[in-house]
Image (cartoon, helix red, strand yellow):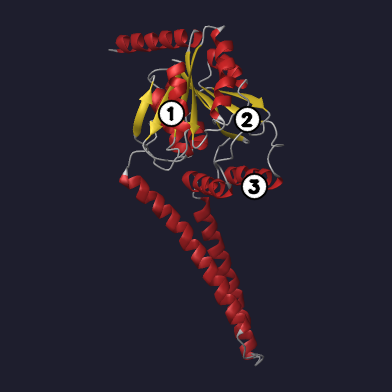
Amino acid sequence: MVENNYNTVDSQNQADSKARKNPKVAIVMPCYNEEEVLPLTYDRLQKIVVELSKEDVQTSLVFVDDGSKDTTWQIIEQMCKKDSHVCGIKLSRNVGHQRCVWAGLSETVEKFDAMISIDADLQDDEYTIIDMVHQFKDGCDVVYGVRKQRTTDSFFKRWSAQMFYKLMRQADSDIIYNHADYRLMSRRAVKALMEYPERNLFLRGMVRKIGFKEGFVYYDRKEREAGTTKYPLSKMIRLSFDGITSFSVAPLQFITVVGLAMMFISAIAIIWAIYEYIKDHTIQGWTSILVSLWFIGGVVTTALGVIGTYIGKIYAEVKRRPHYFVDRSLNL
């Protein structure tokens, strides 16, 4: 039995070694209302496909339509008919960026040796894909794309992003600074990721928990060439809050600290009030009472909101609903 196990492991290692020498790579791109930028994206990524083919790397472009309301899917269909190396996945409805990436990885994991997730707007430097593949050949299972600077972002977006990463680190979440969802993952890394059962997805935190050999590429983020951003401030705040509450109980711990601090302050106030009463220095008034009530009411309401968020997440996990449904797929 032990000998059979060793033979199985050796066979898997040999297959993995062969796959790394001449890998099949999928570039997975979530798309939502990207009709303006898709032709540019295809043209630019074709150059990467040609460069990788010189190194015996078979590369496919996988566009995942996240329930777009424009002509995104029609454009993907046309590209699939023109080029057999272009694949299309149409989700039945809009499920959000994180689930869309998850769907792309899940639908391609059995057909490719490595998968690279990158946003369709190509603000992330596509030429670092070549470096990612090189590191995959050298044995890395996960290669992270990390931004050098955020010069193309507005001051507020840059500041809020930096605050988010600092909060995540203080909340004991081991995420990579200035890394979003631009990364390469080997087949075994994606399969390991699919073992996570949670429905509240925060991929940049989940991938880091896998623990396989990592690599990094660094690049300068570019301006969007066409279309508008699909991540406005409201979605950024929602993703940030999801990330913090999905990977840490720090908000609950913060509430506990605030509660204890309020009890301490209240004890001092009670002692002071008793002392003033004994000295007959009490003054009839409502200001202090009103301020105290508003302060305590705000703290209690905030605490209930945070607790409610965690209960809501538990509710979503218990229901075990699927992440997505595929409506159509082409060339897969």
User: Is 308 placed above or below 120 here?
Assistant: below
Could you tell me which residue is drawn at 63 percent across and 82 percent down? Answer: 287
Is residue 251 in view from this perspective?
yes
Query: Which mark identifies residue 160?
Result: 3
Q: Earlier in the sequence, mark 3 or mark 1?
A: 1
Left or right: 55, with 63 as reference point: right
Q: Amino acid at mark 2?
A: Val
Q: Nearer the viewer, residue 314 or 99?
A: 99
> Looking at the image, which residue sits at the far bottom?
280
Label 1, on which residue? 104
Query: Which mark identifies residue 146?
Result: 2
Q: Position of residue 33 (x, y in %)?
A: 50, 37
| Quarter assignment of residue 169 | top right
Q: Position of residue 320 (x, y in %)?
A: 32, 42
Disc 2, SS: strand
Q: Residues within 10 Å of mark 2 (few under 14, many from 20)?
A: many
Q: Residues within 10 Å of mark 1 (few under 14, many from 20)?
A: many
- Are dots 1 and 2 in contact, CB under 8 Å? no
Disc 1, SS: helix
The quadrant in which the C terminus is found is top left
How far apart, in angstroms, are the residues tagged by discs 2 and 3? 17 Å
Q: Amino acid at mark 1?
A: Gly
How far apart, in angstroms, are the residues tagged by discs 3 and 1? 29 Å
Could you tell me which residue is drawn at 32 percent across and 42 percent down? Answer: 321
Is residue 192 in view from this perspective?
no
Query: Which mark identifies residue 199?
Result: none
